[in-house]
Amino acid sequence: MTRAQAACLIAAALPALGTGAGCAGGRDRDRVVTLRFWAMGREGEVVQELARDFTRENPDVRVEVQQIPWSAAHEKLLTGYVGRATPDLAQLGNTWIAEFAALRALEPLDARIAVSSVVAPAAYFRGIWESNVMGNVTFGVPWYVDTRLLFYRRDLLAKAGYDSMPDTWDGWRAAMLAMKRAGGPDHYPLFLPLNEWQPQAVLGLQAGSPLLSDGATRGAFAAPEFRRAFAFYVGLFRDGLAPPVGANDIANVYQEFARGYIAMYITGPWNLGEFRNRLPAELQDAWSTAPLPGPDGPASGVSLAGGSSLVLFRGSKHKEAAWRLIEFLSRPERQEQFYRLTGDLPARHEAWTAAGLTADPRARAFWRQLQRVVPTPMVPEWEQIATRLQERAEQAVRGTAPPDSVLARLDGDAARILEKRRWLLARGRVSPGSAKDAAP
C-alpha cells in the first residue's frame, strides 16, 4: 500500500480530518507546505537537525521549529488553543495529554496508527503508551521516556552490610536503618524533597491506590491503600531516614551525595549524565541505580510513566505532512540518533538495543523500571491535585497536622478541584475515568 493510499483510508475512516489527507488533488503534495512544530527546551534545539534530514527526504515539506522554554510551554500552548493558533504538531509532556485532549485540541491518531508501517504500540513500553490513551482514543506517540528510580551510593550500602538494593519496602527500610547507624545522626540514607509530589504518588500507586476514585471524580487518599503508603512515607522522616527539607534547601545535591550526607535519591534519567559529570573521579565506581522497591516485592515496585510525546493538532491544515514527520521521528534509527544528541531515553525498544543502553548497568535499571510504570490519573485536573498532595504531605512531615487529618483534607481538596468533572459526568458530557468527550 502506498502512502497516498493509506492516507485515503484514513480520510475515509475520519471524515472530520477535512483536508482529504492528500487524496483529493493531493493538495499537500502538489506544493511545498510549511509545518509549524513547537518543541521544548533542549529538544527544541536538537530537533531542528532532525527536521533538516526530514526535509531532504520530503522536499515537498518545510519545517519551522519553534523552541519554547519548558517554563513557558504550558501557557503558550493554552494561549495558542484559545487564539486558534496552535501549531501543526508539537512535543507535549505526557502528563498534559489529558488536558489538551479534553479541550478537543488534539487529533485522534488511531486510524493513522492502524495503517502505519512505523508506529506500532507493541514497539513501546506499555505504561508509557497508555499515558497517551484516553477513553480508548490515542492522542500521542511517545517520543522519549523517563521515569524515576533509585540513585544510590553502592559503597555506603555495602558498608551497612548489603551487597544489593532490597526490593521490598521492609527490606529497603531495614537497609536504610543500617545505613543510618553506620553513617551517624548527621547523615541521611534517603533524600525525599518536600517540594516534590512524585514520591508520595509513586508509593501510593505501589500500594494499590488509584489516587482518585469514583470515575476519577473524588480523591482516594484516605482509603486504606494510600493510607498505608503515606504511613511508610511519613515514617521515613520520623525515623531520621530522610531530612525534612526541600530541594532548594540543599545547595548542591551532587556535592551532598558525594560527601555522604545523603546516600539515595529518587530521580530520573536526566541525572545519569549529571552524576557522571559532577561526582568526583574517585566515586565513579561507588554509585549505581536500581528499580524502586515495592511493598510486596519487584512486581509491586511501579513508578511513574513520564516523558514527552508527539501530538497532532486538530486545527492543522497539513495533517498528512505532519503525520509523516511524526513517523519519521518515530523510526528506530531516528530514536537512537535523538538519544545520542540529547541523552533522552528512547521510547522504542529497538533503539535501546541499538544504542547499547541495555548493556549499561545504570541505564539497564531504567529499562527494568520502564517495564513497571503507570500513568498518573488521566484527568486534566491532576496537576492541581498533585500540588495539593505535595503541600499536604509537607504538613504531616513537619508535624503541623496529623496524617489522618492531612489525608481527609486532601480528599476535600480533590473533591473541590473535581467538582466540574462531576457536573459534566452527571450530564453525560464525560465518561468516568476517560476523556470520551474529547473523542470525535
Image (spheres, rainbow, N blue to C red):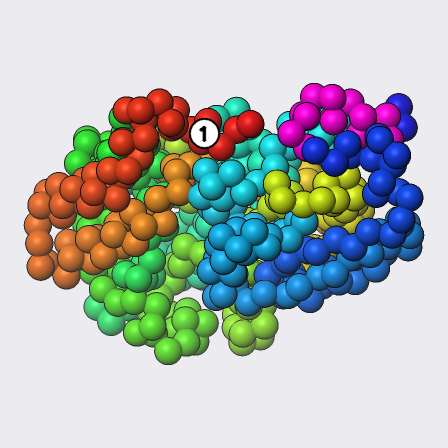
Q: Quarter holding the N terminus?
A: top right
The front one of 57 and 316 is 316
Q: Quarter holding the C terminus?
A: top right
x, y percent for residue 34:
78, 55
Magenta segment: does it hold 35? no
Report the span colored magenta.
Answer: 3-17
Magenta segment: does it hold 5? yes
Res 194 visible: yes
The front one of 413 and 99 is 99
The front one of 82 and 346 is 82
The front one of 26 and 77 is 26
Q: Does residue 313 appear to the left or right of 324 in the view shown? A: left
x, y percent for residue 273:
59, 65
Q: At label 1, which amino acid type do we have?
A: Asp
The residue under the point 30% across, 62% down is 195
The residue under the point 87% across, 36% down is 26
Determine the main secondary structure of the stretch shown in magenta. Answer: helix
Q: Residue 8 lies in what quarter of the image?
A: top right
Q: Does residue 359 appear to the left or right of 72 in the view shown? A: right
x, y percent for residue 137:
55, 28
Q: How many marks?
A: 1
Helix, strand or loop under label 1: helix
Rendered position, 191 above or below 348: below
Q: Residue 379 lies in what quarter of the image?
A: top left
x, y percent for residue 203:
32, 42
Q: Residues within 10 Å of mark 1 (few under 14, many from 20)?
A: some
The residue under the point 32% across, 30% down is 424
Rendered position, 349 above or below 32: above
Res 351 visible: no
- Residue on which the image places disc 1: 437
